[in-house]
Image (cartoon, grey):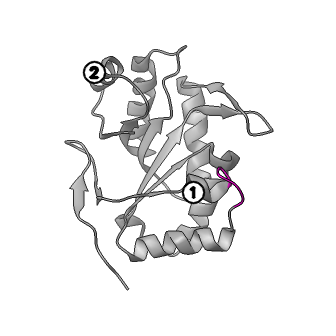
Amino acid sequence: MTASFPIRRLGRTGPQASALGLGCMGMSGMYGPADRAESIATIHAALDAGITLLDTGDFYGMGHNEMLIGEALKGQNRDRLILSVKTGALRDPDGMFNGYDSRPEALYNFVAYSLQRLGVDHIDIYRPSRLDPDVPIEETMGALVRMVEKGWIKHIGLSEVGADTIRRAAAVAPIVDLQ
């Protein structure tokens, strides 16, 4: 059965996506144990229902979430999907929060792993998960712009930032959405 949701453009220059997206964090043990088969079935049901946007973070389940999504997307029409990925949150081996890293060299490393785990050649929306207090947002945005130029990502988003940071970031490149 295929249903549909209203389609909305994200920002002025962003992709068109279903008005309802699927947040996948809970599928990787962030709220307790999660069943792999049930999680994949949930992703498939969402896609069948007309949801086109899947949201994840490279640090959800220490990369497990991206691998799960990559597995679920095998055989799916990639052109109809919008993958939104948060990045930059650091975890220790126990999964505990250990800060943020939005330096360009770290972001290039993070996107390389995300592309591999997801099994895709690009990410539709890529965003720092939080503001890194040690890296000016303009420097982070410069790295994201280079990723767009290389085709690794298509659009830039932001997460958990204030109005001044949004203005400074938007002066460097278009921001298609905020979380």
Mark 2 vs 1: CB contact within 8 A: no
Part of the protein shown in magenta:
29-33
Q: Secondary structure at mark 1?
A: helix
Q: Position of residue 52 (x, y in %)?
A: 37, 64
Figure check: 160 above or below 17? above
Q: Say which of marks 2 and 1 sits in front.
A: 2
Q: Which mark is residue 167?
A: 2
Residue at the spot of label 1? 118
Q: Quadrant of the N terminus?
A: bottom left
Q: Position of residue 155 (x, y in %)?
A: 35, 42
Residue at the extreme left of the image, as rendered? 12
> Which residue appears at 26% of the width and 21% of the height?
171
Q: Is residue 177 visible?
A: yes
> Which residue appears at 41% of the width and 77% of the height?
48
Q: Position of residue 154 (x, y in %)?
A: 37, 46
Left or right of 34, for residue 105: left
> Which residue appears at 51% of the width and 16% of the height?
135
